[in-house]
Amino acid sequence: MTARVCGPCTLCCQFFAVPETGKPTGQWCDHCGATGCAIHRTRPPSCRNFECFWLLDEGFPEDLRPDLCGIVVSFNEDHASVVAHVDPARPDALAEEPGSALLAALSGAFDPVFVVCGAERVMLRRHGQAPDGDDAAPG
Ligand code: SF4
Ligand code: SF4
């Protein structure tokens, strides 16, 4: 179990739906604040159950905290592939450090890697890039 806490980060909160509160996909949550989730102690199960790689793995450098690097990485449901959700406000996050090194490491460890940025969805394979399919990524 990780000793990390989300702290001021709320980047994933814009990407995923929260059925308990009716917050839709792709929209900031009303509880997001400058210091993090305003209802962190009582946040819904959907929020508690989501853990990005930075939160899960203390080996992830601090500068890859999602709100700092603009990228949330998480497992797909099958745990065989990963999804990198890029902050639409920072669409170049994967082309810049530390995001570019993160993408290289993910591509070396997982095949495929899905990248989602706003309405854009791309599936990256080790031997080239393929158009995304309907079942490619959550969110
Ligand atoms: S992106 Fe990760 S660190 Fe940030 S709020 Fe979500 S789970 Fe926490
Ligand atoms: S309730 Fe808190 S953790 Fe859940 S989406 Fe809203 S700000 Fe994020």
Image (cartoon, grey):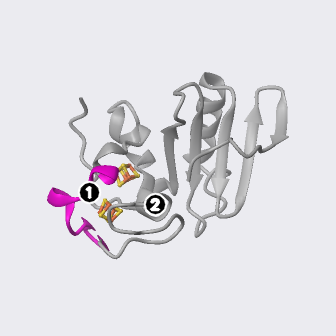
Q: Type of residue at label 1?
A: Pro
Extreme-bottom residue of the structure? 30
Residue nearest the viewer, comparing 12 with 101:
12
Residue nearest the viewer, comparing 49 with 34:
49
Dot 1 corresponds to which residue?
44
Q: Type of residue at label 2?
A: Ala
Q: Is residue 40 magenta?
A: yes
Q: Quadrant of the N terminus?
A: top left
User: Label 1 CB, ligand 2: below 8 Å?
Assistant: yes
Circle 2 residues within 10 Å: few <14, some 14–19, many ≥20: many
User: Label 2 CB, ligand 2: below 8 Å?
Assistant: no
Where residue 51 appears, x then y in whole percent? 37, 42
Query: Where, by quadrant of the figure, is residue 40 drawn?
Result: bottom left
Secondary element at image label 1:
loop
Dot 2 corresponds to which residue?
17
Where residue 126 appears, x then y in whole percent? 77, 26
Task: Using the numbered discs, state the Cα–Cα distance from disc 1 to disc 2 in whole angstroms.
Answer: 11 Å
Image height of 106 relative to 94, above or below = above
Query: Where, by quadrant of the figure, is residue 76 drawn?
Result: top right
Q: Is residue 61 visible?
A: no
Image height of 25 relative to 108, above or below = below
Span colored in magenta: 32-47
Quadrant containing ligand 2: bottom left
Left or right for 54, reference 111: left
Q: Is residue 76 visible?
A: yes
Q: Which sits earlier in the primary sequence, circle 1 or circle 2?
A: 2
Left or right for 131, reference 70: right
Residue sitting at 24 percent across and 47 percent down? Answer: 5
